[in-house]
Image: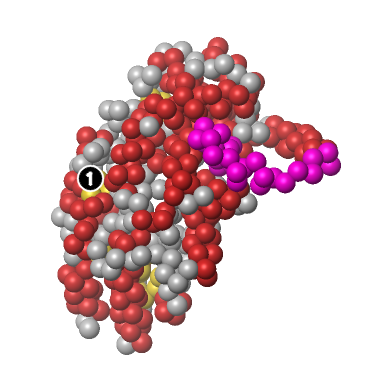
Amino acid sequence: MTIFDLNPASSYRNLKERIPIIKKNNRDFMNKLHKFKLPTEFWWAISGEYAIMSEHLCILSTKDPRLLYGLRTSNKEFPPLKMISSSIIRSFGRESIVEKNPINYKGNSLKNIEEILIDDESKNFPIDINKDPINETLPFISFTLFLNQLRLRKFKYLFLKIKNKFKKLSNNSDYNKDFLKEDHEVKNFDKILEIILPDYLNEYFPKWFVWVSEYIISSKYKWVTKFGYGRDIYQIILLAKSYEKFGDKNIQILSHGSNLSIQFWHMFRISLFPNLKLYSNPDALMLPKFEKAENLGDILFCPGQLPYVGDFFSIDHYRSFIDVYKTTVSLLSSAINDGLKIKIRYKNFDHISGFGGPLTIEECQLPIENEKFEDIYHKYKLIVSMPFGTISEKCYFNNVNCLTYNYPFYLTNKKSYLKTNSYTGVFGDSDKFLNELKKKLKV
């Protein structure tokens, strides 16, 4: 499948070079969509991340036009990267039926790990953890929460439902016709962006609040925030208006989760804040303290999810990772048969529904831990996590006994990767990781 043949580092660099063009296209599209004449920087702060995704999909579709069809016929999902990944996976599923070898798997790519380790954004990825707590500061948060509680969206939903009902009755055209045959780059960008744009930025966008924000935003209001992550649309508009007026002077960005891989999230925010420092936030890493538990379990296994494949993902490296994953599962399964108390805990966030859960048949035999990690980590003698992520970083930060296989399959900041490999219990070498696991299991 040609989508998986692309080099993640080259894809990232080519996309980054196109950001000035993407900004212009995003501004033109959003102004047309919402009948405004607002400047580039306002709309970039609002929808720039999704515009980058749209441009990436335009590039991918030149390699495989079927991607456009799959995207056009997909159900709306959030986050949009999940929707994109689902579409690509379905395309791969179809190709698996049609083609004998849908992916040209190159075999063990351990020797090629340098292909996905880059230094391009090293200044934005400090390798030290900031030990000082940083709290979010959100001006007007009481006001925006109140607006959310008014549920104005429900009234808009009823209006749109009636409007769309009449539209369907009067329009019997083939919805794929003009989409699949389109070869104009900007028009494809517009159509893709409209598909993946979250509804709160599309049909439910509160245009009236843009006018309000113009009058209430001044230089005295300062944000410390994840910039849009988990925030309501009213906060997003206020942030965008502040950015339009004052640039990055009044906004400090907090990182979310572990900072190793480089994804759309990072490209977008670095384009907004070139001097951004993505320190791991100690408040997000701190685990609750408990007295020593009795009747400890032996091992809690915390695997990652099925990866989102819509951005700078390497399937060759993932296949190498999954080989070690399968061996790990086999060792844990055998240890259970030998009497060890082992459970597996999957990520269960709503936004990864369909991407969490078992990756292999054998792991279905492992008992599942359903409680939150933060509530039960102290009830196990050892945490085993792969790949390195937020769980591993929390364990390291809180001196929790943890064993991690750190092998990336996304584009990754090189210095951060090498730094995490120096942590106690973290292994970048598969043989060393598996040998250490065997020692813990006494195999």
Residue 34, image x, y percentages: 62, 25
Whether residue 239 is visible to the viewer of this picture, yes or no, is: no
Residue at point 67% right, 45% down?
Answer: 177
Locate the N terminus and report the quarter of the image it occupies: bottom left
Residue 163, image x, y percentages: 79, 35
Residue to which mark 1 is pinned: 118
118 or 247: nearer the eye? 118
| Residue 278 lies in the magenta stretch | no
Q: Amino acid at mark 1?
A: Ile
Bin the neighbour count of mark 1 within 10 Å (Cα to Cα): few under 14, some 14-19, many 20 and up. some
306 or 375: nearer the eye? 306
Number of numbered discs overlaid on the protein picture = 1
Whether residue 338 is visible to the viewer of this picture, yes or no, is: yes
Q: Quadrant of residue 408?
A: bottom left
Residue interval drawn in magenta? 169-198
Residue at point 18% right, 75% down?
Answer: 435
Q: Is residue 13 left or right of residue 61?
A: left
Q: Is residue 344 left or right of residue 416?
A: right
